[in-house]
Image (cartoon, helix red, strand yellow):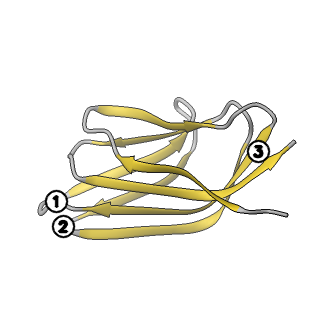
Amino acid sequence: MIYSEQFYYGSGSTSGTVVLFTVPASFVYVIRCVSISWAGTGASSIVLGMNTGGGGLLVANFSAGPADHQWEGRQVMNSGQSLRASTAVAGTTIWVSGYALST
């Protein structure tokens, strides 16, 4: 059976790029949903990407807050790959969920 799992819940970085999680050995993750909540009052943006310099998963731009953004899809991540977040303003909360498949 396949069960949904929460891979990350927490805040984005306010000083560059941080690793949200790394797929453990013997697993493949399928990201199905990303939710971003911006609690501030001004403009903000956040970028989620895979690995250092890797492809972007999503970019969310907020012209004013509070605001929310949601992405749904199917992004496969192999063992050893990392999901990273970058934002320049405090107040962003990120949820990432999907399927954890053992290989």
Q: What residue is drawn where x is 20% and y is 65%?
A: 63
Cα distance between the residues tagged 1 and 2: 5 Å
Residue 28, quarter of the rendered image: top right
| Front residue of 2 and 57 | 2
Position in image of residue 77 (x %, y %): 69, 44
Badge 3 marks a residue whose secondary structure is: strand
| Front residue of 32 and 1 | 1
Establish if 63 lies above or below 44.
Answer: below
Cα distance between the residues tagged 1 and 3: 34 Å
Q: What residue is drawn where x is 35% and y is 51%?
A: 46
In the image, taking residue 96 as reference, residue 87 lies left or right, namely: left
Asked if labels 2 and 1 touch by Cβ distance under 8 angstroms, the answer is yes
Badge 1 marks a residue whose secondary structure is: loop
| Front residue of 24 and 53 | 24
Dot 2 corresponds to which residue? 65
In the image, taking residue 50 as reference, residue 16 lies left or right, namely: left
Asked if labels 3 and 1 touch by Cβ distance under 8 angstroms, the answer is no
In the rendered structure, which amino acid carries the disc numbered 1? Gly
Position in image of residue 20 (x %, y %): 48, 39
Mark carried by residue 98: none
